[in-house]
Amino acid sequence: DDGPDAQFLGDGTGYGGNQKSCYRLALAAGAIVLIVGAHYTYALVPAGRWFADLFGQARNPYDRLGHFMQGLSPCLMVREALVRSAAVRTLALASLGGFLAAVSFSAVYEIFEAAAPVPLADQIDAVRGF
């Protein structure tokens, strides 16, 4: 079947059969995590609250999953772009480039996030989950 789902997800065999399928599944999973987190606000996602209660944690662990996926998705996208453009010679360098791009973007974001509480002190606690 060559429908839209088959084209997006590939054949599901991973890197052995279709090199694009693992990449696409990881991005789809990341998108779902981010969409659910955006809908509920990460600190209030019901599944995360359930895990927090189950494992006796004070903080919703879904927030951590969201942060992980926000780092993984750009890392995979940059890595894939480097591999496809032949900008680097080895897969290891492409992976390193993806990692460094994701870390650099996160560092810039954290700088802005650290500066935001000064003018937005009342609203920022709700965003951070406090």
Image: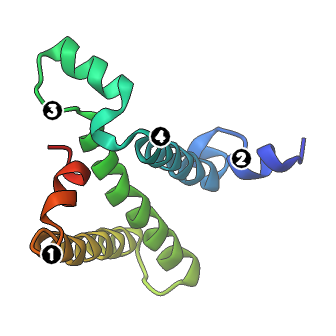
Mark 3 vs mark 2, CA separation in Å: 37 Å
Q: Nearer the viewer, residue 23 or 60?
A: 60
Q: Which residue is mark 1?
A: 119
Q: Residues within 10 Å of mark 4 (few under 14, many from 20)?
A: some
What is the residue that sits farthest to the top in this orientation? Answer: 54
* Sequence-wise first label, 1 or 2: 2
* Sequence-wise first label, 3 or 1: 3
Mark 4 vs mark 2, CA separation in Å: 24 Å
Q: Which mark is residue 25?
A: none
Q: Which mark is residue 10?
A: 2
Q: Quadrant of the N terminus?
A: top right
Give the image location of residue 63, x and y in percent: 27, 42
Residue at image coords 72%, 51%: 8
* Sequence-wise first label, 4 or 1: 4
Q: Secondary structure at mark 3?
A: loop
**Amino acid type, residue under disc 4 in the picture:** Val
Q: Quadrant of residue 20?
A: bottom right
User: In the image, 44: left or right of 80?
Assistant: left
Q: Which residue is mark 3?
A: 59
Q: Nearer the viewer, residue 61 or 80?
A: 61
Give the image location of residue 78, x and y in percent: 44, 73
* Sequence-wise first label, 4 or 3: 4
User: In the image, 30: left or right of 127?
Assistant: right
**Nearer to us: label 3 or label 2:** 3
Q: Which mark is residue 36?
A: 4
